Amino acid sequence: MTTILITGGAGFVGSNFAIYHKTKHAEDTVICLDNLKRRGSELTLKRLKEHSILFVHGDIRNKEDLKFDKKIDVIIECSAEPSVLAGLNESPEYLINTNLMGAINCFECARLNKSKIIFLSTSRVYPYDSISTLPLIETETRFKLDPKVHIQGLSDKGVSEDFDLKGFRTLYGATKLSAEYLALEYAQTYNIPIIINRCGVIAGPWQMGKVDQGVFTLWVARHYYGGTLQYIGFNGEGKQVRDLMHVDDLSRLLEMQIENFEIGKNKIYNVGGGTKVSLSLKETTLLCEKISGKKIKINPVKENRFADLPIYITDATKVNKDYNWTPEKMPEDILKDIYEWIDANKDSLRGILN
């Protein structure tokens, strides 16, 4: 029997993985710790209780909240302030205290418990100025990377772990990269087994999508409830591209990593859907129209937003090879799952997603 602590456990990734793991390992103790700051996270508490998952209302910024009566065997550290725009027009204090100082408190918890730890980082550790200036090919619905460009860590598969980290990456990206460095130092100094997953866009049910984080949920929700959207930047045509990954596919990988920790011990992985599971905003609109049967107004905004990228595709070759893992859910599957989740919970979600 194993005791697993999931920080950010009432959030999108944390709650979905908690239920995924508990369904497979009913004998394990799963503890979800969350400060419930993000609107909508309170709706997950009933789901956690139904699966006999322990919920602790706490905050990783407070190290006292990370002390438990039971020994913690594995920590899944997926608590974060996830917005790329966090701290841009306001104090960065919450961002830094959560993503960096809070992460250190989690590493301390791992040290004291001699726990294994999986740290969910982000593709935003890669500099936006380097990626945003890459030569592109423009098609009718999307941007594509120019295959003639040869840069370290970049191929037709996307961005790999070898991509140059020199440059600016936003305060959000900087806090996550700093936490990565400290995590590896903890691993080396205290012999704490750690795996770092640099995730691209994660999507699926129970993500409370907003303009600056959770764009695919936002897109489906607008088509479900009605309203308007914007194609922001890059001439306002919606051709910017991201790969995406269903939260169930990520949960499946996390389960593999827990069961076979030695394979990934002290390694960094880029984790995402890759070219095969990618969408432009324009393509997302077309799929949302197909799934919902509705068409909404989308206003063009030609000016680029701070740190926005025309394209980001994850090269997940390393984790594919080590764990024989590839995403199973395709883009239309992901958007359909989100639509069906909204439809099944339309009244409780209306005030949050609409």
Image (cartoon, grey):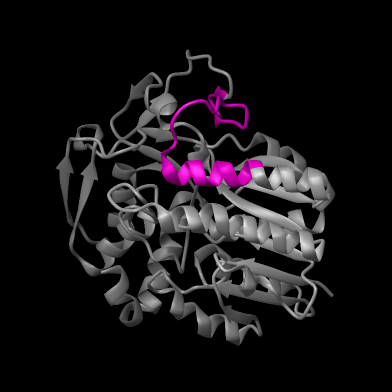
Q: Is residue 189 magenta?
A: no
Q: Is residue 146 above or below residue 114?
A: above
Q: Is residue 307 above or below residue 224?
A: above
The location of residue 285, given as percent across then percent down, is 29, 50
Task: Name the residue nearer the viewer: 319 or 82.
Answer: 82
Residue 177 visible here: yes
Task: Name the residue nearer the viewer: 104 or 83.
Answer: 104
The location of residue 243, given as percent across then percent down, is 47, 42
The location of residue 151, given as percent across then percent down, is 53, 17
Q: Is residue 57 above or below residue 159?
A: below
Q: Is residue 166 magenta?
A: yes
- Residue shown at the point (42%, 61%) measured from the top left: 336
Part of the protein shown in magenta: 154-181
Residue 278 visible here: no
Assign the C terminus to one quadrant of the image.
bottom left
Please state if 300 lies on the left or on the right of 317 as rendered.
left
- Residue shown at the point (72%, 43%) measured from the top left: 185
- Residue shown at the point (41%, 32%) measured from the top left: 128
Toward which corner of the image does residue 198 lie, by quadrant?
Answer: top right
Toward which corner of the image does residue 52 lie, by quadrant?
Answer: bottom right
Assign the N terminus to one quadrant of the image.
bottom right
- Residue shown at the point (58%, 61%) measured from the top left: 248
